[in-house]
Amino acid sequence: MEKSQFLLYNEILYQLSSCRTVRALSQTLLNQLKLLIPYTYASLIPIRTEGGELVHGEPVSVPGEFARVEKTWGERTDQWYTLWLSHAPEAMVIRDRDILRDGRFSSPAYDSCFGAYAIHDCMQMNIVHAGQVMARLALYRTKGEDLFSDEEVFLLRAFGSHICLAWYNCLFGWQTGEEAGGPADLARTHGLTRREEEVLELVHQALDNPAIMARLGVSRSTLHKHLQSIYRKCGVSSRWELQKRLK
């Protein structure tokens, strides 16, 4: 990552952490992200659960009029690809061409919604935290523009946990007070097992892996599995991020 990219990356993280509402976060994310990963069209589609079913809300798009066609596409019940990503239990970044051999852009159904926009590449990320599916981000480029690169996929993935946590806080954290950060509180909030809570408590005590293994009498591979499960459930990607959540 070049120095200018690194500085911009940090500025975007600061802007995201400053948002206190989903509306503000949506606009900030779309506007700031374009500086690092250029796009022609983009949408954020909120997702909520009603009666055990996922429901797609009103899209927030750039430009604003693009929301109309995004909503029309989202109302189609036969688009397994879109529905699959919305239901994915963990945050991930994908390009359409990575999983669709011929892409969705050449299909009659897609052309009926997006044909006038000359789109030829799309990169998407689902926004999920602690098992809570909250939204889906879609970035589009048109014919004549470069395809989304592997580096750009990496950059969006690098933002992933920060975007998911910021969205979660805007929906729940800032409205009800910050999430309690002690090991017991995090374990209860994120549904950790008793053993995972024990590991979390020892991480909170700043013990390293060998010390935790000795204390609990577990192997390195078993401890690694517990830590990865804790990271996934708590919506973090490293011990450093986890320790920041612990107070």
Image (tube, helix red, strand yellow):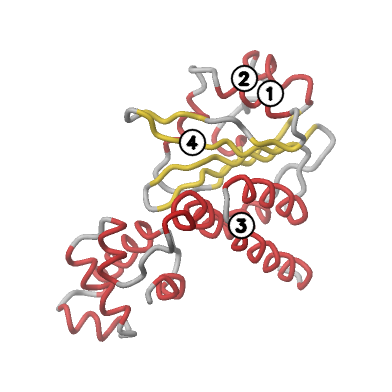
Label 3 secondary element: loop
Find the distance from the CA under tag 1 to the CA under tag 3: 26 Å
Q: Which quarter of the figure has residue 76?
A: top right
The tag on residue 54 is: none
Please tell me which residue is depicted at 68% across the width and 53% down the height of the picture.
152
Residue at the disc numbered 2? 72
Please tell me which residue is depicted at 62% across the width and 32% down the height of the picture.
59
Residue at the disc numbered 4? 47
Return the disc, 1 or 3, that comes first in the chain's sequence.
3
- Image coordinates of residue 62 in percent, x first then y, are 74, 38
Residue at the disc numbered 3? 19
- Image coordinates of residue 65 in percent, x first then y, are 75, 28
- Image coordinates of residue 38 in percent, x first then y, are 77, 48
Q: Which three-letter amino acid code belongs to the residue tagged 2?
A: Thr
Which one is in front, 91 or 25?
A: 25
- Specify the quadrant that holds the C terminus: bottom left
Above or below, 244 relative to 92: below
Q: How crowded is mark 1: few (under 14 residues within 10 Å), some or many (20 or more)?
A: some
Which one is in front, 226 or 102?
A: 226
Label 2 secondary element: helix
Residue at the disc numbered 1? 68
- Image coordinates of residue 84 in percent, x first then y, are 45, 32
Q: Which three-letter amino acid code belongs to the residue tagged 1?
A: Arg
Say which of marks 3 and 4 sits in front: 3
Say which of marks 2 and 3 sits in front: 3
- Specify the quadrant that holds the N terminus: bottom right
Return the disc, 3 or 4, that comes first in the chain's sequence.
3
Find the distance from the CA under tag 2 to the CA under tag 3: 29 Å
Find the distance from the CA under tag 1 to the CA under tag 4: 17 Å
Return the disc, 4 or 2, that comes first in the chain's sequence.
4
